[in-house]
Image: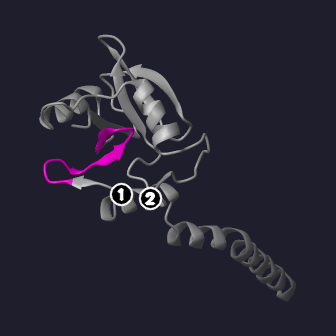
């Protein structure tokens, strides 16, 4: 009887040791860490660090001689268009070419996945999201992915995780 009990105790201790070595560290680090995505979202909410702010539009990024305003997250194309229209005269959806210029020239970004973009050594108000661009057809539109620096089309009626509205206007 003592042999069986000793064997069970040893097995239990081995299982406990395995849990402590392999399972517990992952669980602790997962619960205590904040994902890069959540950290960026928090920075955007609390400290947008935009280089320009005007009284009419609030926080506005100025780049490439244009005003850029970043809007809602997880938005559909029709919702983005309503938001842009609500901003007033001169605001519109950017073209793919304008978003490409903003990514490469205005913000000086490169195709580097999972690195936070920066603007004048501050956290960017742009981030990694896919920004809605111009309309493609009645049922589709384009977006520009700020993670990889490329554009693609999507069904304009669907809601996609990571899509964000962006508006642009020429500097007055």
Residue 99 in percent (x, y) is at: 42, 32
Identify the colour scheme used: one colour
| Residue 154 position within the rendered picture, expressed as x and y whole percent measured from the top left | 41, 22
In this view, the residue in front, 169 or 157, is 169
Number of the label disc, if any, that sits on residue 123: 2
Q: Give the magenta part as a residue range.
A: 54-70
Q: Which residue lies furthest to the right in this view?
A: 3
User: Based on the displayed image, in which of its 4 quarters is residue 135 positioned?
Assistant: top left
Is residue 58 magenta-colored?
yes
Residue 9 against residue 81 in the figure, above or below: below
Q: SS of the residue at dot 1?
A: helix
Looking at the image, tell me whether mark 1 or mark 2 is earlier in sequence order. Answer: 1
| Mark 1 surroundings: few (<14), some (14-19) or many (≥20) residues within 10 A | some
Q: Is the magenta stretch mostly helix, strand or loop?
A: strand
Residue that appears at 31% across and 65% down: 46
Mark 2 and mark 1 in contact (Cβ < 8 Å)?
yes
Q: 79 or 149: nearer the eye? A: 149
Q: Position of residue 63 (x, y in %)?
A: 38, 43
Residue under label 1? 44
């Amino acid at each position: 009887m003592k042999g069986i009990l000793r064997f069970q105790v040893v097995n239990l201790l081995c299982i406990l040791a395995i849990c402590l070595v392999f399972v517990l560290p992952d669980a602790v680090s997962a619960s205590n860490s904040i994902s890069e995505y959540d950290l960026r979202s928090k920075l955007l909410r609390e400290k947008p660090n935009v280089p320009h702010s005007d009284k009419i539009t609030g926080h506005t990024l100025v780049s490439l001689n244009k005003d850029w305003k970043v809007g809602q997250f997880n938005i559909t194309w029709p919702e983005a268009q309503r938001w842009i229209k609500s901003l007033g005269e001169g605001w519109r959806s950017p073209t793919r070419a304008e978003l490409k210029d903003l990514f490469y020239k205005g913000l000086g970004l490169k195709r580097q996945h999972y690195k936070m973009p920066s603007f004048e050594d501050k956290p960017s108000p742009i981030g990694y999201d896919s920004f809605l661009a111009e309309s493609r057809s009645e049922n589709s539109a384009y977006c520009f992915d700020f993670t990889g620096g490329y554009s693609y089309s999507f069904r304009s009626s669907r809601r996609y995780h990571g899509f964000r509205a962006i508006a642009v206007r020429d500097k007055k």
